[in-house]
Image: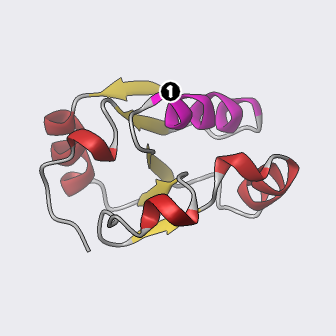
Amino acid sequence: MADLSQQDWEEQLEKDTNAVILDVRTEEEIEEGIIPNSINIDIYKGQEFVADLEKLDKTKNYYVYCRSGARSGQACAIMKSLGFDKAFNLQGGFMNWEGETA
């Protein structure tokens, strides 16, 4: 797991042909907007969150974000414990995101 600045996260994501963007925010937070092409799995769903993670392809590279970067850091740690090799946390989260939104 790595914490990446927005610039590093975007640059790495742009070059990554095996990338999945994972948004771990709540439905209410998603109404504020999302980073394009991201999938949402709410970390606050507890065991359901873990079960949904288990359905994901562990060979992919995951770019994870939440509102501020704290929950996405936790999500990356959970993913690592589940056998995901590549999970990258967006420092500062969606709150500090300056890129495109949908």
Q: Is residue 76 left or right of residue 53?
A: left
Residue 102 lies within the magenta run = no
Left of 78 or right of it: where is 90?
left
Residue range corresponding to the magenta coloring: 70-81
In this rendering, is residue 88 above or below 35?
Answer: above
Q: According to the image, what is the colour scheme of the structure? A: secondary structure
Q: Position of residue 52 (x, y in %)?
A: 76, 61
Q: Residue at x 41, y 70 (%)?
A: 31
Task: Residue 1 in the image: state x and y as whole percent.
Answer: 50, 27
Q: Position of residue 91 (x, y in %)?
A: 32, 29
The type of residue carrying mark 1 is Met
- The residue lying furthest to the front in this view is 28
Disc count in the image? 1
Q: Residue at x 70, y 33 (%)?
A: 78
Which residue is drawn at the image coordinates 77% and 38% (left, top)?
A: 82
Q: Main secondary structure of the magenta part?
A: helix
- Please state if 70 lies on the left or on the right of 26 as rendered: left
- State which quadrant residue 85 falls in: top right
Secondary structure at numbered mark 1: loop
The x and y percentages for residue 100 are: 15, 64
15 w.r.t. 7: above or below = below
> Which residue is tagged 1?
1
Identified at 41% across, 59% down, the residue is 18
Task: From this view, report whether residue 64 is shown above or below residue 70.
Answer: below
| Image quadrant in which the C terminus is located | bottom left
Left or right: 37 in relation to 79: left
In this view, the residue in front, 68 or 4, is 68
Nearer to me, 94 or 2: 94
Is 77 one of the magenta-colored residues? Answer: yes
Q: Quadrant of residue 66?
A: top left
Q: Nearer the viewer, residue 51 or 43?
A: 43
Neighbours of disc 1 within 10 Å: few (<14), some (14-19), many (20+) = some
